[in-house]
Amino acid sequence: MRNKILILDDDEDILYFCSVVFENLGFDVVSSPHSKDIIDQVEQAGPDIILIDNWIPGLGGIKATQTLKEAQHLKQIPVILFSANSNLPALAEEAGADSYLKKPFDLDELESLALSLLNK
């Protein structure tokens, strides 16, 4: 069975490159340019892992992640928060994210981080 990732970012280039990386790994990729209705988006996508930008329109990465982690049926899905923000480790901790990735990031680093979270 293929893994599925939900990528939330309003930057089309990032969505494209991240999609290519995960498609090459054999993932099904679902993407969204906003975090509105985050619970509905995740329920419909059924991802094994979520990659979310801190500055995503809608709730924003922190609130969207907190919302997911408060939902009993979704809190086990690993969430990677990514941003160019200098205090990203603190933001990721506040959000309850499973990990974080600083922008700009290396695609190999993204790949290995996601795979390590899936194999926990």
Image (cartoon, grey):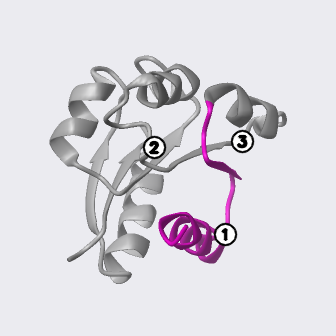
Mark 3 Cα-neighbour bin, 10 Å: few <14, some 14–19, many ≥20: some
Q: Is residue 85 one of those drawn in magenta? A: no
Q: Nearer the viewer, mark 2 or mark 1?
A: 1
Q: Which residue is mark 2?
A: 11
Q: Quadrant of the C terminus?
A: bottom right
Q: Where residue 58 appears, x then y in whole percent?
A: 40, 18
Disc 1 secondary structure class: loop
Q: Which stretch is magenta?
A: 96-120
- Outermost left residue: 44
On screen, residue 36 versus residue 101, left or right, reads: left
Disc 3 secondary structure class: loop
Which numbered disc covers residue 106?
A: 1
Name the residue rendered at 69%, 55% in the picture.
104
First along the sequence among labels 2 and 1:
2
Q: Residue 54's image quarter?
A: top right
Q: CA distance from mark 1 to mark 3?
A: 13 Å
Q: Which residue is mark 3?
A: 84
Disc 2 secondary structure class: loop
Task: Residue type at mark 2: give it.
Answer: Asp
Of 14 and 38, the residue lying toward us: 38
Q: Nearer the viewer, mark 2 or mark 3?
A: 3
Q: CA distance from mark 2 to mark 1?
A: 16 Å
Is 34 located above or below residue 44 in the figure? above
Of 119 and 109, the residue lying toward us: 119
Q: CA distance from mark 2 to mark 3?
A: 13 Å
Q: Where residue 77 appears, x then y in whole percent?
A: 42, 48
Q: Where residue 72 appears, x then y in whole percent?
A: 37, 29
Task: Residue type at mark 1: give it.
Answer: Asp
